[in-house]
Amino acid sequence: MFSQSDSEPLSPAPESVAAFCQRREPYLPNAQTDQPFIQAMRDITHWHQQQSPWYRRFAELNGVEAAEIQTMDDVLALPPIHANFFKRNQVLSLPDQGQLKTLTSSGTTGQKSQMFFDEFTLGHARDMVLRIMEQRGVMSDQPAHYLVNAYEPYEGLKVGTSNTNQFLMQFAPVAEQFWALRYLGAEGHQFDGFGAINKLKQWAQGDTPVRIIGFPAFLHFILQRMASMNEAPLRLPEGSWVMFGGGWKGHADQAISREDMRAQIAHWLGIPETSVIESFGSVEHSIPYVTSRQHRLHQPIWSRVVIRDVKTLQPLPPGEPGFLSFVSPYITSVPAHSIVMGDMAVWHQPDLADAEEPPTPWFEILGRAGVSANKSCAVAAAEMLK
């Protein structure tokens, strides 16, 4: 039933999980990958039951029997763990903490969500990003300037978003980089909007493409500041991109629609809307969700997106709003293979008539569920704007 017998020591990852995570085509119809996905989920559930005493007890209390996971309905019925659980609890499925990398999801203030990654999990998560970005057309050998609307790194910084943005700068060689949240030593980080504008004006005079990555709120405020200063619109060099990561959370009252944001970028920077990419992810669930040319967050083959009823946590059909949830076999370090987020969302069936769109379901984020004092990266960063 499983990739390894119960009497054998567990390998760094079940064989079916390793094989599934190594699949290179990021978007295929669910029907083409359902069976290996189910097997990988069955084996990773068994893995966490064997490796994590906490998850073993959790599974017992919820009547989970890994061997009984035979259909996709069985996979979706796995009880999800809320992402907030990992803010207060260290639950590992690997005993050797010395082999684990630690990342946190919050900034300098607020409650931190700490996650642990082994080489298998982190390596495959990054490979998945590379495969998706390669298909999206972002990979290039041509050097690029980077405006990074995130925390400037320093030795010892473990914030997940800064780690992610450093990884995103591998998609094209770095010609020059500018971090909008400048590190000031003991004073922490400070938003440098004027410095960002001056750098964009300088780069607009050359022919090296510009890549703008990080929190969307900070780019919005940079463009607002350009307008208030009566700056002339810029035309960044051909081949420039905007790649958003993180949310508006601390400034939700000032957030504008995605459509308006793309229009502002086109007006002030000369970057076409098809070259604006949004992504969704978290330190608790590192599978990449990246918008298509139609600006839809499509599910890659390595996960299944589930929208759950807010009362029962049962899966909902397309078009009905509920809690955003994910199942994926990619993670071996922590039992986060079935997780529910603090976001409200809705999912849609793929548009198979559009040959340019991925043939997988896609989802829309509707907002955060409820109000909490907890702060995410975006919240902590947004406080710098006040």
Image: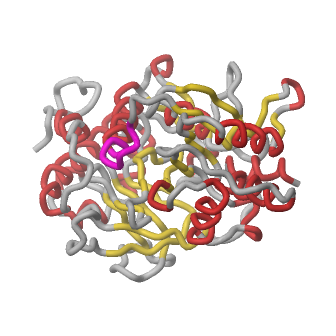
The quadrant of the rendering that contains the C terminus is bottom right
Specify the quadrant of the image occupied by residue 325.
bottom left
Q: Position of residue 163 (x, y in %)?
A: 57, 32
Does residue 266 show up?
yes
Specify the quadrant of the image occupied by residue 134.
top left
Q: Which residues are magenta?
A: 132-139
- Check residue 152 for magenta coloring: no
Task: From the image, give the main secondary structure of the stretch colored magenta.
Answer: helix
The quadrant of the rendering that contains the N terminus is top left
Q: Residue at x 36, y 67 (%)?
A: 362
Q: Position of residue 88 (x, y in %)?
A: 63, 45
Which residue is at the far left?
1
Q: Position of residue 29 (x, y in %)?
A: 18, 62
Q: Position of residue 349 (x, y in %)?
A: 29, 74
Q: Nearer the viewer, residue 210 or 5?
A: 210
Does residue 368 show up?
no
Query: Count of labels shown?
Result: 0
Which residue is at the far bottom?
320
Q: Residue at x 13, y 55 (%)?
A: 35
- Is 159 on the left or on the right of 191, as rendered? left
Question: Above or below — where is 71 with respect to 235?
Answer: below
- Is 254 on the left or on the right of 321, as rendered? right
Q: How is the image coloured?
A: secondary structure
Question: Above or below — where is 295 with respect to 281?
Answer: below
Question: Above or below — where is 190 with respect to 368?
Answer: above
Q: Residue at x 26, y 74 (%)?
A: 351
Q: Nearer the viewer, residue 198 or 255?
A: 198
- Is 279 on the left or on the right of 7, as rendered? right
- Is 323 on the left or on the right of 27, as rendered? right
Q: Residue at x 39, y 67 (%)?
A: 294
